[in-house]
Amino acid sequence: MTKNEIRSCEDALRLLAAYIDRELPGPTDAKVEHHLETCRSCYSRAEFEKRLKASLAELGSEPVRPALAERVNTLIRTFSVAGGD
Amino acid sequence: MPAQTVHSMPSEVDRAWFGERVDTLLPELYGRALRLCRHRANAEDLVAEAVARAWESLPSLEDRDAFRAWVFRILNNAFVSSCRTARAKADHEPLDTTDRAFSLFERLHQPILLWWGSSPETDFLNRLLREDLERAIHGLPEPFREVVALVDVQGLPYQEVADLLDVPLGTVRSRLSRGRSLLQEALWEHGIEAGLVEGDRKADPNTSEKKAHDQE
Ligand SMILES: [Zn+2]
């Protein structure tokens, strides 16, 4: 697949997002990895994008207001169970 | 607690187990919901709905060790059916793929910034606050925000996002690419406003010329 040949930084950068998302098929993934090992500029770029993605992942957890915790607890108490009334 | 299927109606023991698991995961459920719905009240409603749905489906959960991923899937499905607006579901104009993506990294490395430090991008990320990222992601147009929230915040594979939103894989890729580009642009603009990019170095030559001209 010529589409996945990496001959230049441009080729590597085109695949970089999918590489960081671990969405590339094995052989292509290995080619990008090889490029990053040998190209300082693309390596820095990859590190930057990875760190930014990791910062976004931290937004997936958020302190909960006591009111929400209480609401959820109350809700769970209303669930009917076997052997209950 | 044995990891076994609850065949019929859950018991009091199941309820205690469920309550404890939900309580532990609440910050994550809420964080995910907030990125998807943006508004606190909607996000809280979504969490409550997901918890109710999870309880109803509990008899179908075969492996209780898989509870975490399972309940997040339920949350996302509840988002699609309840919280997601018609605007996000609507078909969109095909994106102009010739439009070059905005790259924060490239901006930080433009020659005008070169004397800034050895690693301007690391400095920039270090100065960036959690709330800066929140504001940037919440400011994205909905179709892009939800894909960024699912792939970058939640770490879901593209195919799972495509299935969830019922769009082709290519649409996930293009929305993600556009969403990230817009996000980086928003962070760059915020960086300039908040002084994360210092002094005159931030200046676009055209802008500073125009400003100088306006002041005359
Ligand atoms: Zn390179």
Image (cartoon, helix red, strand yellow):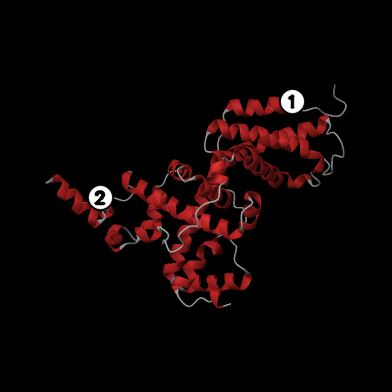
Taking the image as shown, residue B73 lies to the left or right of residue B185, namely: right
Alpha-carbon span between mark 1 and mark 2: 57 Å
User: Does label 2 point to a residue whose CB lies under 8 Å from ligand 1?
Assistant: no
Q: Identify which residue, A61 or B35, lies in the foreground.
A: B35
Location of residue B44 (image quadrant)? top right
The residue carrying mark 1 is A77
Residue A23 placement (x, y as % from top left): 60, 63
- Tag 2, which chain? B
Where residue B15 is drawn, which disc sits there? none
**Label 1 CA crowd tier, 10 Å (few <14, some 14–19, many 20+):** some
- Identified by mark 1, the residue type is Arg
Residue B132 placement (x, y as % from top left): 42, 43
User: Does label 1 point to a residue whose CB lies under 8 Å from ligand 1?
Assistant: no
Q: Identify which residue, A23 or B112, lies in the foreground.
A: A23
Where residue B199 is drawn, which disc sits there? 2
Looking at the rendered structure, the secondary structure element under dot 2 is: helix
Q: Is residue A64 among what the camera can see?
A: no
Taking the image as shown, residue B107 lies to the left or right of residue B153, namely: left
Compared to B208, does B76 lie above or below?
A: above
In the rendered image, residues at marks 1 and 2 fall on the same chain = no
Compared to A9, does B132 lie above or below?
A: above
Location of residue B15 (image quadrant)? top right
